[in-house]
Amino acid sequence: MRIIIFLFSLKFLKSQETSYTELCLAFNYTKINDEMAKNVGTQLSCHSQQLIKIDLHLRTAYLGDNNLHSILVGLSKCSLVEDLKLELIYNRLTSEGARQIGKALSQLKNLKILQIDLDQNEIDEHGISQLLYGIQECQQLTEVNLQLNENKIKSQDTSFFTNQLQKLRNLKTFKLGLKCNYSALIGLQDLSGLGKALAQSENVQFLKLDLSANKINNQILNSLSLEICKMENLQSLQIELNENQMTELNLGQVFERCQNLNQFKIRAIENQIDSTGIISFCQSFKKCYSLQILDFDLSYNQIRNEGISQLAETILDLKNLRTLNLSLEYNFNDQFDEIYLKKLFIKKSQLVKMRIVVFGLV
């Protein structure tokens, strides 16, 4: 049985005699004061030995670290929970709050699915490290979705990720958002720490990263690629690289070594990728023999006709490809014939589903 509670109706929980295993508390855009936070924590504690799935939606609830602590005291006692979602966007949380979350999570040994959204808070790299330390104590985890966009990460590297995922041997799905952090002002200079953490997650099959707006250049992306390529069980790779400083996509090692990759999604909107960079990319991309789903958005770059032609030829050689979503809007493509390109794919490929957009010229 599942119970969904909105806003101030927590008293409803007290009157429930029927046992239930799923609980959803939705307090989005509601300012949570001390009393309300303690009430939530108390109710979680009271029902701790029956809950298997918990969703806490607390977007823009102005919690702060202290009120979050009151809730986490109850959550940490829910030792049977297997599926947990914490939506904590814009709650004035600092690294102390992240540390508290990590401490609470370390008590949830049965946890298998974890989603935490901490976007738009004030957490730095030390808080993230402590959060990750708590997460890796949940060794039954198969899926982790960790969103840390628009926080206060000041480090120019990602060394705080190193060794933080190595205990999660059952992890199959990992999603991470690091878009537009404080470090974006000066740029991430090294992604190898994150890469090494991912490389230790050798059983991960689905990987999604959002690294947009971090001033990432060719060399920095290459350092990440050299580690991701060690994830030989990888089947799906999704990377958001919008608003960075790349002139090419240095992912060649991934395509050469990750032979089980069947889905590839990349968004590199508003970079400086030109035809030379695309032609270089295609040399390794053509080795992605198992690919079935391709979602490619290179809008607002500097790709000319020769780059588009080479990319089209490479995609046509991917004989197992069934779904294609290709967007090349607002490039230097000199009136490239979009209709011709679509007819070419229809005639020569095995595509079942296709969307191609080339118009929108610079």
Image: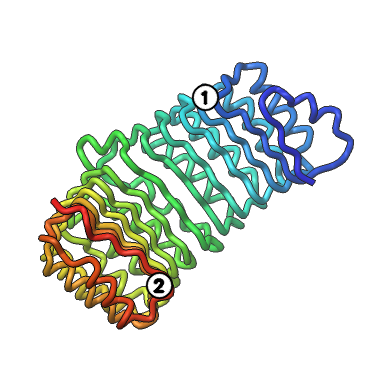
How many residues crowd mark 2 within 10 Å: few (<14), some (14–19), many (20+)? many
Q: Amino acid at mark 1?
A: Asp
Residue displayed at 53% across by 31% down: 59
Q: CA distance from mark 1 to mark 2?
A: 41 Å
- Mark 2, residue position: 261
Residue projecting furthest to the right: 17
Decide which of 166, 212 is in the foreground and name it.
212
Q: Secondary structure at mark 2?
A: loop
Circle 1 sits on which residue? 65
269 is higher (above) or lower (below) than 47: below
Q: Who is closer to the viewer here, 136 or 336?
A: 336
Residue 109, horizontal then vertical, whole percent: 65, 50
- At x 62% / y 36%, what residue is drawn? 56
Residue 232 point in image, percent of width and height: 40, 72
Image coordinates for residue 340, horizontal then vertical, percent: 22, 72
Badge 1: residue crowd in 10 Å (few <14, some 14–19, many ≥20): some
Closer to viewer: mark 1 or mark 2? 2
What coloring was used for the rendering?
A: rainbow
For residue 289, which quarter of the picture?
bottom left
Answer yes or no: do the residues labelled 1 and 2 have beta carbons within 8 Å?
Answer: no
Taking 338 as reference, is 264 left or right?
A: right
